[in-house]
Amino acid sequence: MMVLVLIVAGLVVVALLVVLFAPHIRKYSAGGTCMSMARLDGKTVLITGANTGIGKETALDLAIRGARVIMACRDVEKEVNHLHILINNAGVMMCPYVKTKDGFEMQLGINHLGHFLLTYLLIGLLKRSAPARIVVVSSLAHNVGWIRFHDLLSQGSYNSGLAYCQSKLANLLFARELARRLKGSGVTVNSVHPGLVRSELVRHSTIMSLLFSLFSLFLKSPREGAQTSIYCAVAEELHSLTGKHFSDCAPASVAPQGRNEETARKLWDASSELLGVVWDH
């Protein structure tokens, strides 16, 4: 009985500490804010996954700055003459094993291959609209990811968490290799980690949903999570910076596997083969 009383008392103390210090921890965890006041009048922006979460907040911010924002959420087709900013934001996380219509494992298909193909289709337009920017939303999860070239589509075995980490590492490697290939074109490419954000992204994982609910006070809001994407899209000081990774509106470190040029090129070739495309730029 005494042990039970001590445990309950301890939990009460922890709860009180959380209530007392949550605002201060929350302020710290919110991270950087994009301070740029840059206008985007006359500019066209395309954002994937802009119907909810950080994508929606990014779209709202850029629209307020005067941009024409195209929200590529599902099967929306738009004809445009110029494209100045492309934000590859759409994503899924830790979903059960399922394939896209094209037969790709869902997380790699949506998080990486879909954006790889979309960028391929739009790259000519972006180059003609230069100066232009491409922002790729990755994640801190890339640190524990690796590219399973022997089973890229998880047909041999599937772990939802590992597949997610692989897709986020693929985002970062794609941005890095694309930046290398586009040097001198007037189109910059940078990747971002938005932070831990209260969003629908964790809806497929009961454990992650529970953890996010328990620690919601310490998570970023979608608006806060969108700040680094906005920063990379508009900040004047980044007009010629390319091939970098950002978090909290500041340069961020990249895991060794995310800096491996050989892996980046090998993934590029594998992705091109899966999608049946040939880049001539």
Image (cartoon, rainbow, N blue to C red):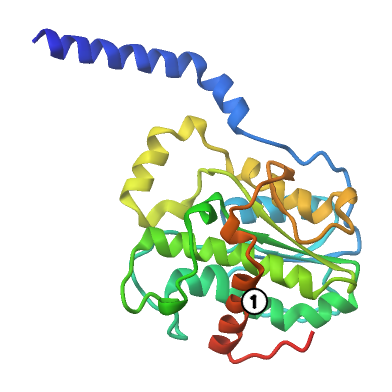
Quadrant of the rendered structure where residue 26 is? top right
Direction from residue 221 to residue 240 in the image, left or right: right
Can residue 55 be seen in the rendering of this structure? yes
* Depth order, front residue of 54/162: 162
Point out residue 190 in the picture as x, y percentages from the top left corner: 74, 59
Vertical side of 184 occupied by 69: above or below: above
Point out residue 257 in the picture as x, y percentages from the top left corner: 57, 60
Hey, what amino acid is under mark 1?
A: Arg
Direction from residue 81 to residue 103 in the image, left or right: left
Q: Which residue is mark 1?
A: 265
Find the residue positioned furthest to the top. 2
* Depth order, front residue of 277/34: 277
* Depth order, front residue of 34/7: 7
Direction from residue 23 to residue 14 in the image, left or right: left
Question: What count of labels does the image hold?
Answer: 1
Vertical side of 243 occupied by 281: above or below: below
| Residue at x 39%, y 13% (from the top left corner) | 16
Find the residue positioned furthest to the left. 1
| Residue at x 53%, y 52% (from the top left corner) | 143
Mark 1 falls on what kind of element? helix
Q: Residues within 10 Å of mark 1 (few under 14, many from 20)?
A: some
Point out residue 280 in the picture as x, y percentages from the top left corner: 77, 89
| Residue at x 80%, y 50% (from the top left corner) | 64
Can residue 51 be seen in the rendering of this structure? no
Q: For the N terminus, give its image quadrant.
A: top left
Q: For the C terminus, give its image quadrant.
A: bottom right
Point out residue 117 in the picture as x, y percentages from the top left corner: 63, 80
| Residue at x 32%, y 47% (from the top left corner) | 207
